[in-house]
Image: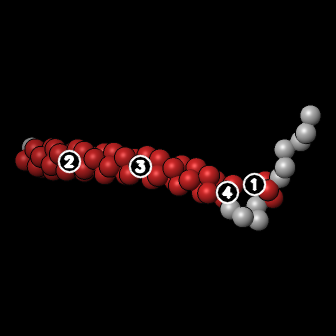
Amino acid sequence: MQTSEKRLDELEIKVSYQEDLMQELNAIISNQQKTIDRLENTLKLITERINELSVSLPGNPIAEEKPPHY
């Protein structure tokens, strides 16, 4: 009977460690998602800014294109 109790104790310890690990991994994933969201937003802003600046560059065919006359 002692071995069954010992095995049960060992299983309970393993489950406890796994629960702690899952909480830690969940926190890590949550932080990573926040970082990804922030980086995506930054990339979007940078892309918009580059597009704004590239339109106004000299030699840009779009910027130098004359509007059609009606």
**Identity of the residue drawn at 76% across and 61% down:** 60
Q: Residues within 10 Å of mark 4 (few under 14, many from 20)?
A: few
Q: Where does label 2 land, which residue?
A: 20
Q: Residues within 10 Å of mark 1 (few under 14, many from 20)?
A: few
How far apart marks 2 and 1 lie (CA) works out to 58 Å
Q: Which of the two discs, 4 and 2, labels the residue nearer the N terminus?
A: 2
Q: Amino acid at mark 1?
A: Ala
Q: The residue tagged with tag 4: helix, strand or loop?
A: loop
Horizontal arrangement in the rendering, residue 23 relative to residue 40 (left or right): left
Q: The residue tagged with tag 2: helix, strand or loop?
A: helix
Q: Position of residue 24 (x, y in %)?
A: 25, 50
Tell which tag, 2 or 1, sits nearer the viewer.
Answer: 1
Horizontal arrangement in the rendering, residue 69 relative to residue 41 (left or right): right
Q: Amino acid at mark 4?
A: Ser
Residue 16, picture quadrant: top left
How far apart marks 3 and 1 lie (CA) works out to 32 Å
Q: Which of the two discs, 2 and 1, labels the residue nearer the N terminus?
A: 2
Quarter that holds the N terminus: top left
Q: Amino acid at mark 2?
A: Asp
Q: Position of residue 38 (x, y in %)?
A: 41, 49
Q: Amino acid at mark 3?
A: Arg
Q: Where does label 4 land, which residue?
A: 56
Residue 9 in view (yes/no) = yes
Q: Where does label 1 land, which residue?
A: 63
Q: Which of the two discs, 4 and 3, labels the residue nearer the N terminus?
A: 3
Q: Position of residue 57 (x, y in %)?
A: 68, 62
Q: Which of the two discs, 2 and 3, labels the residue nearer the N terminus?
A: 2
1 versus 70 height, above or below: below
**Identity of the residue drawn at 76% across and 65% down:** 59
Mark 4 and mark 1 in contact? Answer it, CB < 8 Å.
yes
The residue lying furthest to the left in this view is 2
Q: Where does label 3 land, which residue?
A: 38
